[in-house]
Amino acid sequence: MRTTGVGLMAGLLAVTPAGGATYFMAPGGSDAAAGTKDAPFATVVRAQQAVKPGDTVVVGGGTYKMAEAQAARRGRGRMQVIVLDKSGSEGKPVTYQAADGDPPVFDFSAVKPAGSRVAALFVEGSWIHLKGLEITGVQVTQTRHTQSECVVNQGSHNVYEALKMHDGQAIGFWLGGGSDNLVLNCDAWRNHDFTSENKMGGNVDGFGFHVQKGSVGNVFRGCRAWFNSDDGFDFINTAESVTVENCWAFYNGLSADFKRLGDGNGFKAGGYAGTPVERMPSPVPRHTIRGCLAVGNRASGFYANHQPGGNDWFNNTAWKNTTNYNMLGRNAENSADLPGYGHKMRNNLGFAPLHAELASLNKEASDVGGNSFNLPVTVTAEDFLGLDAADLTAPRQPNGDLPKVALLHLAPGSDLIDKGVDAGLPFRGKAPDLGAFESGQ
């Protein structure tokens, strides 16, 4: 049995207490108040004015109805409503966390600035920890190609934990810059832009990663994305690599009543959309997608998206996507598509695709071993403890981790157990199992 310390420091960061002063805010509070439990502030803006590194703001439950007049910044076709630009410091983050019990819901449905792209919560400070906040109703007003965002990160060393971003027209979480950020146990669902372009929402992903050179060490862990009108996770046009681990993407590219909308990939990991080679990053970043689950996405479950070069795909499970694994590549000049090359694929499991299990992979120019599509195994329903798709939206565990469910976990006696190869991740038994879930856990 192998164990590993992968991601340990990022995990510890999410649970380290701040240890400073504590302030309170509530929907019925007042910014003229003292910020105590009995006299809370009303807005994040006022709370930010009060905090210093190491301080905590407890955000009381209820609905915070946001208005355009509250916007911190506007101009040049953009509106940033709540801006967090006051940083903590190493070991002393500034924390904004939900009070126990009733969740705080920030409702942006009334923020409709004509012709402006909306960023509901724009974080450019560093050493900030957001936990348990809910954002809904973020709008799009432009009719050309555009986007709005629920949460935008531009700072470094930030932790986003147990955020919920849903039922708006905006991308859930957009990481546009900064290093060593952790997006932990966050959910983004039912986001669909029905206003711009063809109204199909082809730019609205659950989670986006699109950074400039130098933004390194970023991680998405334990996140879920579903019924977003474009992709679950999208890393197109990014200059640095990202790690995605133990995340679920399902039913993306579809509405909640299963009408076809945007692209609909679970994990879109790469690509530069025809960018001239002289403007592409050098080297082209290599992303890591491990322990992830893709189910029922309109297009591909795991998609290389014309990536000129490979990614690392370890211990993932794909079920009922149109294509489970699509490694479509691009030549080094970014001028023509070709079967993907340079990929490292270990212990991936696919089951019951609607069209194809594996597409557009140059196996000879990749490092492919221990996957269900290149082993002498047959994957059937009997290999799994459960195939109830309702498990995908089961409540999270009390600590915020993904739910413990039977879905796509291997049944005792399955020939997929111990069929993998060592990829540097923890496993039980003689060898890793195939797929995202080790049997017996």
Image (spheres, rainbow, N blue to C red):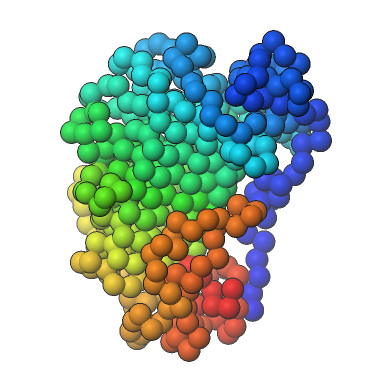
Image quarter in which the C terminus is found? bottom right
Which residue is nearer to you in this view: 148 or 7? Answer: 148
The x, y position of residue 217, in whole percent, is 57, 45
Instruction: Tell me which residue sits at (30%, 56%) in the image.
Output: 297
The x, y position of residue 287, in whole percent, is 45, 52
Residue 401 lies in what quarter of the image? Answer: bottom right
Using the image, determine if residue 222 lies above or below residue 26: below
Residue 44 lies in what quarter of the image? Answer: top right
Instruction: Tell me which residue sits at (65%, 42%) in the image.
Output: 101
Instruction: Tell me which residue sits at (75%, 44%) in the image.
Output: 16
Which residue is nearer to you in this view: 207 or 112? Answer: 112
Instruction: Tell me which residue sits at (50%, 41%) in the image.
Output: 164
- In this rendering, would 377 be left or right of 438? left
Using the image, determine if residue 230 lies above or below residue 199: below
Residue 188 lies in what quarter of the image? Answer: top left
- In this rendering, would 293 be left or right of 326? right
Residue 332 seen by the camera: no
The x, y position of residue 23, in whole percent, is 74, 26
Q: Which residue reaches farthest bottom?
A: 413
Image quarter in which the N terminus is found? bottom right
Which residue is nearer to you in this view: 258 or 233? Answer: 258
Using the image, determine if residue 111 lies above or below residue 92: above
Number of numbered discs visible in the structure rendering: 0
Residue 311 seen by the camera: yes
Which residue is nearer to you in this view: 186 or 393? Answer: 393
Using the image, determine if residue 110 lies above or below residue 319: above
- In this rendering, would 282 be left or right of 412? left
The x, y position of residue 89, in whole percent, is 73, 30
